[in-house]
Each structure stands twice: as C-alpha cells, then as structure tokens.
Image: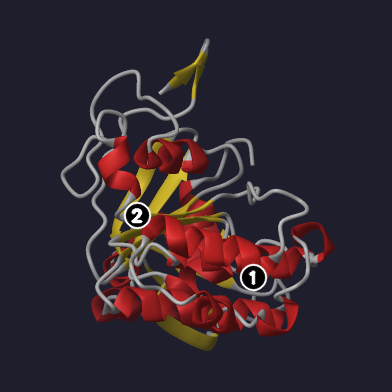
C-alpha cells in the first residue's frame, strides 16, 4: 500500500481468528492504521488482496459493514451528538436487537447519556467509540488504539469488554503501540516495523521462541569472550547482563563453568521467556520510532 512515493505497508500477510484477540503492535508510523483501514474498506491496496469474512472490503463493503464493528483512532463522531442518541442511532442502523442502554452500561457511560461528545473526557470518548463498535454485534471488530488517553480504571473496563467480545466468537483485531496493552490483551500478536511484519504468531509462541538468561556479577569479566564461547549475544544492561536467545540447561551449564574458570561470580540468575517488551525492542531496534 502506497501514498505517493511513500510505502505505508509492504508484503503484509496475517490471519485473525474467531474468538481470539489479534494485536497489531508497532511504533507510530509502522503501518498499523493503514492495514486496519484496508481491512475496513477505507483504503484500497495497491497490490495483493484483503479478505474479511471471505469478502473484499472494497467490492463488498455494503455487505461487510453489517458484519463488522469499527472503532476509529480519532473517534469520527459529531461533536454535538449526545451519548444516548448516537448509540441508539447506531443500534437502529444495524437492526440486530442491541439495546442502546445496555451497550452504554457495558462501557460505563450510563451517567453520561445526555452529555455531548465534545463534553466527554478523552477516556470517555474512547469508551463511547468502543460502544458504537459493539452495536453491530460484530463477527469481526477492528479497534484502533482503544485505550489511548484512557485512565487506569477505564483501561481495565475496556480490556474486560474486549475479552468478553472475543468470548462470544468475535475476531478482535486491535492496533496499538502500547506494549502493556498488547501483553494484557493479546492471544495473537503481529509486530510491524517500517511497513513490514517482523513477527507473527500467538503471544505464547512468540515468547517461547525468545528466551534469555539474566544475571549479575560482582567481578568484571570479558563479555565479548563469553558471548563468543556461548555463541549467543550478551547485553550489558548496567546493573545486569542478558544472554539473549536461549535458556537451555546445557547453555547455563557452559556459562556457569566459564564464569567459574575465569573467577567471576554469578548473582541473581534468572532464565525464561523474554517479555514482549524486550522482543519488541529487539525486533524494532535501529529504525525510527
């Protein structure tokens, strides 16, 4: 997908599954919103194809709109529209028997039904946008930065709504640049960097492929020599060292032997799967953020 001479998305391919939350994660400008907008039918792709529920979002947009829920990054709601009125209007458009007051209560805005969009706080506006996406009883929901500008309690509520939505069998596609949100919400993760996908799979599988050993030492040692001996990269993080790419018992044994032979002690040894934050930083290092 291109905008003039700029490539917004290139060679992207992923699936979102019913009953699961697929998080599209990436720095600002990585191509997340462009990808979601192509899936929603708001943007045409310049090559390749997009299918949502077996339909072409451009050619079959009228059919598709009845089956998907959309939460835009910037809201897209008329400033003087009242909460109760706009939700009721959306419910009537879809005609799927969704009760406006129930949706409003789901996102915790029952005390704001007579308030206009422009009078809501940023977090309340986000919750209203999410409510509108729910009025379709969607089979697929596209949520762009759903917790942006939302306080802690509001985030907890939005996460609960998203998880509940997935439990109904809806395929939830959520775009965010916030690592904490991704780790809390995701069943599957697609990591974007500079318009391309650099990781794609279940959160569990992505983390299981990225192990690390963390430790401290009170005695200086040759980090480069140890890295060469183990054949794994080692980072000096200031107060601790991180061996990336393994947590294998045999490697830990070799590491312990090398440190002992060179008179260096090992403190606070920890081994296990990397955090999503560490994986993300490694995969997106070196580019513009």
Q: Camera-side residue: 53 or 31?
A: 53
Label 1: how many residues lie within 10 Å, few (<14), some (14-19) or many (20+)?
many
In front of the other: label 1 or label 2? 1
In the displayed structure, would residue 102 be above or below residue 33? below
Q: Is residue 232 visible?
A: no
- Per the model, the C-alpha gap separating discs 1 and 2 is 21 Å
- Snapshot quadrant of residue 141: bottom left
View extreme (right): residue? 119
In the displayed structure, would residue 101 be above or below residue 245? below
> Which residue lies at the image location 23% right of the left edge and 29% below the top edge?
49
In the displayed structure, would residue 124 be above or below residue 54? below
Q: Which mark is residue 84?
A: 1
View extreme (left): residue? 54
Percent position (x, y) of residue 190? 37, 53
> Which residue lies at the image location 27% right of the left edge and 76% below the top edge?
248
Residue highlighted by disc 2? 68
View extreme (bottom): residue? 268
Percent position (x, y) of residue 276? 46, 66
Disc 2 secondary structure class = strand
Percent position (x, y) of residue 41? 38, 35
User: In the displayed structure, does residue 224 sit left or right of residue 206?
Assistant: right
């Amino acid at each position: 997908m291109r905008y003039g001479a700029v490539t917004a998305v290139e060679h992207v391919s992923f699936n979102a599954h019913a009953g699961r939350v697929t998080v599209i994660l990436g720095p600002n400008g990585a191509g997340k919103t462009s990808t979601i907008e192509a899936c929603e039918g708001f943007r045409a792709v310049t090559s390749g194809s997009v299918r949502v529920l077996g339909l072409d979002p451009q050619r079959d947009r009228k059919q598709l709109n009845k089956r998907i829920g959309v939460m835009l990054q910037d809201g897209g709601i008329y400033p003087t529209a009242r909460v109760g009125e706009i939700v009721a209007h959306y419910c009537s458009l879809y005609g799927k028997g969704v009760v406006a007051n129930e949706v409003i209560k789901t996102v915790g805005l029952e005390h704001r039904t007579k308030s206009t969009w422009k009078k809501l706080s940023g977090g309340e506006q986000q919750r209203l946008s999410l409510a509108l996406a729910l009025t379709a009883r969607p089979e697929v929901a596209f949520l762009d930065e759903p917790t942006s500008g939302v306080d802690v309690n509001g985030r907890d509520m939005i996460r609960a709504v998203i998880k509940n939505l997935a439990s109904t069998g809806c395929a939830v596609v959520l775009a965010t640049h916030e690592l904490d949100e991704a780790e809390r919400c995701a069943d599957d993760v697609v990591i974007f960097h500079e318009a391309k996908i650099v990781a794609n799979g279940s959160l569990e599988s992505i983390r299981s492929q990225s192990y690390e050993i963390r430790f401290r030492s009170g005695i200086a040692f040759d980090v480069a020599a140890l890295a060469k001996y183990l054949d794994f990269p080692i980072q000096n993080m200031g107060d601790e060292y991180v061996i990336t790419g393994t947590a294998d018992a045999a490697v830990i044994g070799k590491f312990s032997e090398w440190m002992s032979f060179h008179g260096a002690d090992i403190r606070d040894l920890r081994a296990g799967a990397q955090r999503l934050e560490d994986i993300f930083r490694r995969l997106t290092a070196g580019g513009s953020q």
